[in-house]
Image (cartoon, rainbow, N blue to C red):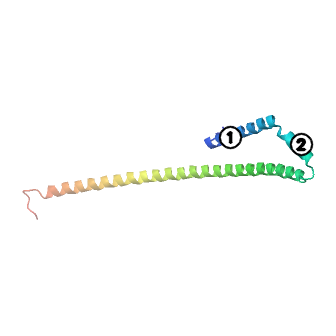
Amino acid sequence: MKKIIITTNARKDLFVLILVTLLVFVLSYFFDIFVFIVRFLEKYPRDIIYVDEVITVLLSLSIGFAVYSWRRWVELRKETSERIRLQEELLRVAETRAEAERIICKQLHVEIEQRKQGERNASSQGHKNKGPFRRPS
């Protein structure tokens, strides 16, 4: 089972959401907001004719926002997994390239050493033939 890590922004948002929910609960409890709404509707029934439509719209909006956020979350998970896969592939390519560069550098180093050795051998051969007391032929 994967461990879910909550980022700092998500924790802050969750904390604010819980705080606002508790504040609304406390205010509703002390000021009896629902009772106020019911009394207002009983007192002025002709002035407010679209209450049932407003409640239906608010309910459908809350369900719609829940579905919308769930779909965005699924989309984000897919994008995150794709990004992780691409980053891992990029790391493999970088490691392969670094290994290839290391092999090329090693081969170049060997070739340089072979040339230097060949030059040393050629120069030492030249010194044997051209000593201070030998005459050129």
Element on which disc 2 rests: helix
Element on which disc 1 rests: helix
Find the residue positioned furthest to the bottom. Answer: 137
Describe residue 61's horizontal placement relative to residue 73 as left or right.
Answer: right
| Residue for point 85% across, 41% down | 36
Judging depth in this view, the residue of 20 and 103 nearest the camera is 20
Horizontal and vertical percent position of residue 80: 64, 49
Mark 1 neighbour density, 10 Å: few (under 14) some (14–19) many (20 or more): few
Which residue is label 1 attached to? 16
Q: Is residue 38 above or below residue 137?
A: above
Spatial CA distance of label 2 from label 1 is 31 Å
Judging depth in this view, the residue of 86 and 114 nearest the camera is 86
| Residue for point 78% across, 50% down | 67
Q: In what quadrant of the picture does the N terminus appear?
A: top right
Horizontal and vertical percent position of residue 121: 23, 54
Find the residue positioned furthest to the front. Answer: 43
Which residue is label 2 attached to? 39
Q: Amino acid at mark 2?
A: Arg
Q: Which mark is residue 6?
A: none
* Upstream in sequence: badge 2 or badge 1: 1
